[in-house]
Image (spheres, coloured by chain):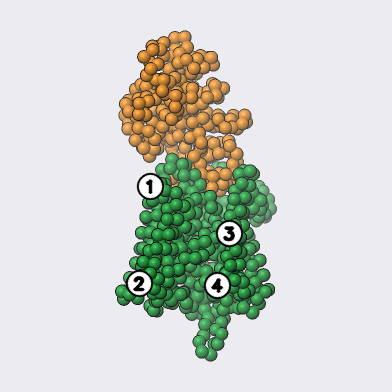
């Protein structure tokens, strides 16, 4: 398996046949060259879990808390997914937090004050998100205002809109059962397992199908060992998580039974798969990376750079709307601070901590999920440890700074080593 | 040469506001030949290339491609005809791999999904056709390639589309000796494959090494278009610096010409 023999492949060009060893070598080479990807975030997640787990064995490591992490992190993770698109172009959306608040408020007001049904109110909130994104994107791409300024202005304006919508700060509560279920209920144990096993099977089928179709054309394929490792890794994580989440975790099981995977998990998984597909398997996604990497090259290749730029803000605000709906669902209400305070910074932090570059061109949607998990664990663990909000913010700020430094330093290192 | 020109420009004028950058420029590009386009800074080389590639529109003059008069208004028009430009600054995306760069903006799709195997195969075939022997992987990021390899990818990108005319803007400007030789060999091979090649260069050694014809621009006018075998090194240098050499080139300047063209110092 460790030969480096060349093999005729990809037409007539000779390329090195990849082996497990060459894969490991390449990966190590990329890490040394500064392309760390999600590695620091995953290591950080493990370390944080060990620290909090050791300090608060009974609370942090309980299945109840494990399930809580998902609903606590959902809003931030979903907003961060949208921000990944914006960051891929080297832009920033500082208004995503309050945009999610505005969209959530639109939904809540239509549901509660106007008696709309969820199937009209939720789309109304999503459309609000799309419109917000289009306006922001238009101002950045066509008018040419730096995104930092546009979204900073929008940050303030949306905060105001939220106050106006809520008539100066009245708390609007939501009683619609569908909306409340989104962030507060769990799937049945049976469906939890169906989802987990189905995901593993689908992933394995995709991977094997890819190998088969490439091998049929005589192209190089990933070594079987690496593919088995990927499938096995996913299976391990999903099955262990599902096993934990399908345990009874109610404090008093006699009164009410709480078990099953939280509904936010399939929602996050759906968008993770959707946006990963869009970014890595479609022309649009390829063009997003191209514009982020070298906008002039993209323009010369005939890519409509302005339209791509507008579209990422639309996706960003759309995902903010989804996040806002989940935030309203979790809180059962909307108030002037929904999507405010630390939501935006946590979301930007999640994307960057997960390994998305602030300089554009580098990042994946899964970075938002991993980074979001880090942020959720810090938030959750520090509360359980009894630290005040002040200490929590300082710590999260430091983690974000570290992540941004890793990003900046790896960029310099990449420039220096030429890899 | 019995062959008729593949691309022929006649009487091209181009102004930017009050500044006329190109005056009545003519240029013929023959299939299977390398035509070197030379000229001092500000002579209008880049402007001429941008007119041909559709980035600028011409004010007057005709463009004939393959015997038919054509109008080129956008880069798309140029690539539809089969005219590709390899720019000096390469226009590659560092964060994409070789295959992704070669197909940028013209990706092959199956339904809505990118058809990666087909693209990888076509990219491999094209590189093989250019005698690029080994690359570590076609999925290597362009950021990790050397200058010569990057230039090769940029050239391969241009010939991938069955293009007929390839214009290279200073392909060797940033390269070392060995890599320059490699790229010049590649340029020669393009012509040997039957393409019309335009090589823009400041380097006389490069020009004499690979070109069949030399076209010299002087202050926005075509001073002369000659066969490389018929001229000497110093004659070409004179054409570039003075616009004429012996009985070659432009007639002696009149004061009126001077007033007319002096502002053309800005190479756009």
Residue B175, placed above or below residue A315:
above
Say if labels 2 and 4 share a chain: yes
Q: Which mark is residue A69?
A: 4
Name the secondary structure under disc 3. Answer: helix
Marks 2 & 3, CB-CB < 8 Å contact = no
- Provide the chain ID for the residue under circle 3: A
Residue B250, placed above or below residue A151:
above
Marks 4 & 3, CB-CB < 8 Å contact = no
> How many neighbours does mark 3 have within 10 angstroms: few (below 14), some (14-19), or many (20 or more)?
many
Q: Check the rendered structure and report the hue given to chain A.
A: green
Q: Compare residues B166 and B55 and report the one nearer the observer.
A: B55
Task: State whether residue A100 appears in this view.
Answer: yes
| Residue on which disc 3 sits | A400
Say if labels 2 and 1 share a chain: yes
Task: State whether residue A234 appears in this view.
Answer: no
Residue A346, placed above or below residue A182:
above
Q: Quadrant of the C terminus of chain B?
A: top left
């Amino acid at each position: 398996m460790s030969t480096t023999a060349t093999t005729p492949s990809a037409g007539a060009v000779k390329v090195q046949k990849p082996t497990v060893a060459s894969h490991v070598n390449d990966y190590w080479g990329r890490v040394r060259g500064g392309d760390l990807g999600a590695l620091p975030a995953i290591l950080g997640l493990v370390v944080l879990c060990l620290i909090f787990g050791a300090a608060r064995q009974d609370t942090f490591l309980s299945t109840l808390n494990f399930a809580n992490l998902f609903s606590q992190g959902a809003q931030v993770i979903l907003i961060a997914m949208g921000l990944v698109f914006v960051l891929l172009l080297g832009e920033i959306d500082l208004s995503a937090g309050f945009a999610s608040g505005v969209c959530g408020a639109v939904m809540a007001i239509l549901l509660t004050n106007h008696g709309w049904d969820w199937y009209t109110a939720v789309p109304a909130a999503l459309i609000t998100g799309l419109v917000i994104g289009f306006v922001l994107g238009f101002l950045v791409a066509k008018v040419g205002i730096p995104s930092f300024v546009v979204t900073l202005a929008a940050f303030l304006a949306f905060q105001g809109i939220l106050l106006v919508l809520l008539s100066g700060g009245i708390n609007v509560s939501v009683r619609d059962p569908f909306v409340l279920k989104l962030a507060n209920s769990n799937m049945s144990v049976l469906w939890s397992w169906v989802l987990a096993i189905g995901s593993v099977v689908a992933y394995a089928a995709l991977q094997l199908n890819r190998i088969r179709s490439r091998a049929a054309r005589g192209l190089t394929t990933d070594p079987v060992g690496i593919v088995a490792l990927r499938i096995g890794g996913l299976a391990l994580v999903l099955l262990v998580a599902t096993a934990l989440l399908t345990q009874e975790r109610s404090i008093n099981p006699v009164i009410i039974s709480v078990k099953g995977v939280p509904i936010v998990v399939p929602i996050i998984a759906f968008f993770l798969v959707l946006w990963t597909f869009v970014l890595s398997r479609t022309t649009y996604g390829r063009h997003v990376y191209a514009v982020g990497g070298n906008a002039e090259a993209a323009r010369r290749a005939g890519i409509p750079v302005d339209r791509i730029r507008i579209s990422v803000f639309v996706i960003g605000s759309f995902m903010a709307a989804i996040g806002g709906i989940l935030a309203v669902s979790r809180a059962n209400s909307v108030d002037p601070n929904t999507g405010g305070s630390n939501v935006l910074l946590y979301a930007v932090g999640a994307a960057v901590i997960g390994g998305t570059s602030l300089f554009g061109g580098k990042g994946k949607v899964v970075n938002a999920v991993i980074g979001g998990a880090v942020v959720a664990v810090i938030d959750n663990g520090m509360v359980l440890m009894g630290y005040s909000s002040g200490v929590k913010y300082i710590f999260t700020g430091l983690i974000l700074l570290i992540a941004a430094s890793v990003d900046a330093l790896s960029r310099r290192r990449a420039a220096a080593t030429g890899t | 040469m019995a062959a008729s020109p593949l691309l022929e420009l006649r009487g091209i004028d181009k102004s930017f506001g009050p500044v006329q950058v190109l005056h009545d420029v003519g240029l013929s590009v023959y299939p299977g030949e390398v035509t070197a386009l030379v000229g001092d800074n500000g002579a209008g080389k880049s402007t001429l290339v941008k007119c041909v590639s559709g980035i600028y529109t011409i004010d007057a003059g005709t463009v004939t491609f393959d015997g038919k008069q054509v109008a080129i208004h956008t880069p798309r028009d140029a690539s539809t005809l089969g005219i590709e430009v390899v720019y000096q600054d390469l226009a590659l995306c560092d964060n994409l791999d070789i295959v992704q760069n070669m197909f940028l903006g013209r990706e092959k799709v199956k339904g809505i999904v990118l058809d990666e195997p087909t693209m990888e195969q076509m990219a491999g075939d094209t590189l093989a056709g250019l005698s690029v022997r080994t690359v570590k992987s076609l999925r290597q990021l362009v950021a990790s390639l050397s200058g010569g390899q990057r230039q090769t990818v940029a050239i391969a990108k241009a010939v991938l589309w069955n293009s007929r005319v390839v214009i290279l803007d200073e392909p060797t400007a940033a390269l070392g000796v060995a890599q320059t030789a490699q790229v010049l060999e590649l340029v020669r091979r393009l012509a040997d494959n039957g393409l019309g090649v335009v090589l823009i260069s400041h380097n006389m050694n490069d020009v004499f090494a690979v070109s069949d014809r030399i076209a010299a621009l002087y202050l926005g006018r075509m001073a002369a278009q000659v066969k490389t075998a018929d001229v000497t090194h110093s004659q070409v240098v004179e054409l570039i610096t003075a616009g004429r050499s012996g009985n070659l080139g432009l007639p002696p300047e009149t004061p009126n010409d001077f007033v007319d063209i002096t502002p053309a110092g800005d190479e756009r």
